[in-house]
């Protein structure tokens, strides 16, 4: 940049710029401009304020607690377990009723398992062998059921066999029943009790109707019109999630129960309702080897000789996840505090002003002051006036603290004795007060 360019740049620093407006006398342009303004104004009023309620303060930090209970009984009669009655303590895991719980609907039972040696199953690749050297003693079978003993067992096939293992024998049966073990589970009921709180607005509510009639919850069932009877039939929940009970009961699955609390707290508390939705969370369309939901557990016993044995159960069932979400909206305080006539009153109620205590000598003087003491008639100068000027503020000349924090002196009144008050004395006291 040359010398001339630098000079022009420096001189431009002292330039003054102002805007120039051009008024176009064109009806089309003016109409388009006004329509654009009307569109923006309509957007703000209709969408922002009416639909989205932008004037409200929103609390999304929802605090929630969920308690669940399942009720129902089922009767089975099988060769493995015999005749047996199943209640909630048998088929609900865990039993304490959390927001995630599991209901057993199908079982594969392997009774009377004891710790001894037996052959590994043929569908375990690491358990296959052709001679004893293929089974290293003390080595655990990968994805198998026990520890190798060093022997290769050939049952009916001299070329290939399976390793002998030390495990809980007999091994778990592989067959699965074609019908659900607990068919009655479709009529079980689920009670979901939900407590919520919006801490920002100190608002709390429950999804259970606040009534003293205990028989209400024993007879009601959830429906489109009964928001405050959270007792759900298990088969209905699966149907609302778009699944079939028979299919889920055989292989298992995961159901999500969603509770939404979207509350407009400008309205009455009775207008804040829970809304329920149901969905299947596992991939029901993927028919893979890992589809469904199952796990194993065992029950242990001892025989007369004190030897331990167990009954192994592979449980298929339905897992329920209860999820709670929501938000609370309340009228914004800015309107109350700044935009209405009584804004000062609401502002004083919302914000409390804390002041330090006055000096101790002032408190002592006010305590010694008698309630009826007024100003006695004294000359404009002299010891009487000097004493009044030196003493703390008397009752009729004390200050009043208003709600907005302003300190205003009260007007001086004549003493109860009825004597007139010197005008110069009043002026002097008022000057001191100021």
Image (cartoon, helix red, strand yellow):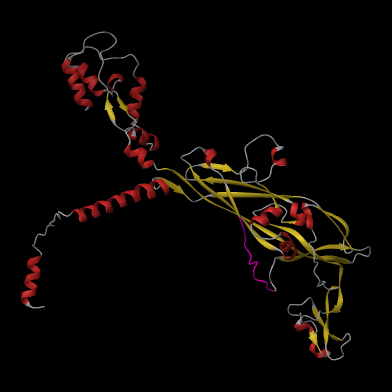
Q: Viewed as shown, does residue 124 lie left or right of 419?
A: right
Q: Residue furthest right?
A: 304
Residue 284 lies within the magenta run: yes
**Total numbered badges shown on the rendered structure:** 0
Q: Quadrant of residue 84?
A: bottom right
Q: Does 370 appear above or below 70? A: above
Q: Viewed as shown, does residue 398 lie left or right of 307?
A: left
Q: Residue at x 39, y 50 (%)?
A: 47
Q: Which residues are magenta?
A: 278-288
Which of 219/130 is in front? 219
Q: Viewed as shown, does residue 338 lie left or right of 276?
A: left
Q: Is residue 194 visible?
A: yes
Q: Residue furthest front?
A: 28
Looking at the figure, which quarter contains the C terminus? top left
Give how far across and how far down residue 403 sits, in percent.
34, 31
Q: Is residue 52 visible?
A: no
Q: Does 143 appear above or below 41? A: below
Q: Quadrant of residue 369?
A: top left
Which of 235/74 is in front? 235
Q: Does 383 appear above or below 74? A: above
Residue 57 lies within the magenta run: no
Looking at the figure, which quarter contains the N terminus? bottom left
| Chief secondary structure of the magenta portion | loop
Give how far across and how far down residue 30 sits, in percent.
21, 53
Give how far across and how far down residue 174 sits, in percent.
80, 73
Give how far across and how far down residue 152 sits, in percent.
84, 86
């Amino acid at each position: 940049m040359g010398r001339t360019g630098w000079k022009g740049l420096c001189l431009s620093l002292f330039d003054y710029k102002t805007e120039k407006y051009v008024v176009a006398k064109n009806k089309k342009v003016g109409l388009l401009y006004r329509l654009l303004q009307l569109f923006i104004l309509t957007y703000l009023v209709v969408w922002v304020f009416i639909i989205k309620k932008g004037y409200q303060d929103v609390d999304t930090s929802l605090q929630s607690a969920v308690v669940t209970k399942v009720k129902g009984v089922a009767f089975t009669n099988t060769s493995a377990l015999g005749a047996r009655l199943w209640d909630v303590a048998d088929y609900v895991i865990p039993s304490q009723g959390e927001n995630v719980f599991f209901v057993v609907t199908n079982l594969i039972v392997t009774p009377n398992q004891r710790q001894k040696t037996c052959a590994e199953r043929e569908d375990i690749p690491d358990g296959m062998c052709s001679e004893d050297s293929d089974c290293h003693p003390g080595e655990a079978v990968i994805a198998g059921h026990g520890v190798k003993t060093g022997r290769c067992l050939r049952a009916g096939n001299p070329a290939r066999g399976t390793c002998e293992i030390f495990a809980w024998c007999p091994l778990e049966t592989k067959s699965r029943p074609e019908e659900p073990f607990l068919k009655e589970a479709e009529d079980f009921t689920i009670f979901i009790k939900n407590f919520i709180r919006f801490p920002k607005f100190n608002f709390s509510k429950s999804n259970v109707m606040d009534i003293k009639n205990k028989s209400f919850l024993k007879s009601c069932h959830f429906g489109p019109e009964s928001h405050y009877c959270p007792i759900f039939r298990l088969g209905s929940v699966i149907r609302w999630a778009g699944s079939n009970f028979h299919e889920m009961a055989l292989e298992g699955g995961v159901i999500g129960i969603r509770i939404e609390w979207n509350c407009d707290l400008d309205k009455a508390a009775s207008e804040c309702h829970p809304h329920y939705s149901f969905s299947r969370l596992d991939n029901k369309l993927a028919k893979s080897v890992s589809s469904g939901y199952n796990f194993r557990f065992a029950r242990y016993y001892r025989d007369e000789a004190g030897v331990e044995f167990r009954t192994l159960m592979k449980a298929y069932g339905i897992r329920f996840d209860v999820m709670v979400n929501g938000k609370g909206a309340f009228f914004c305080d800015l309107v109350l505090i700044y935009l209405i006539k009584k804004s000062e009153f609401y502002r004083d109620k919302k914000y409390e002003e804390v002041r330090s205590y006055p000096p101790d000598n002032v408190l002592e003087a006010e305590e010694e002051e008698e309630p009826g003491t007024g100003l006695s008639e004294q000359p404009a100068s002299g010891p009487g006036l000097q004493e009044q000027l030196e003493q703390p503020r008397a009752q009729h000349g004390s200050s009043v603290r208003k709600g907005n924090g302003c300190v205003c002196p009260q007007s001086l009144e004549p003493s109860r004795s009825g004597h007139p008050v010197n005008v110069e004395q009043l002026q002097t006291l008022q000057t001191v007060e100021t």
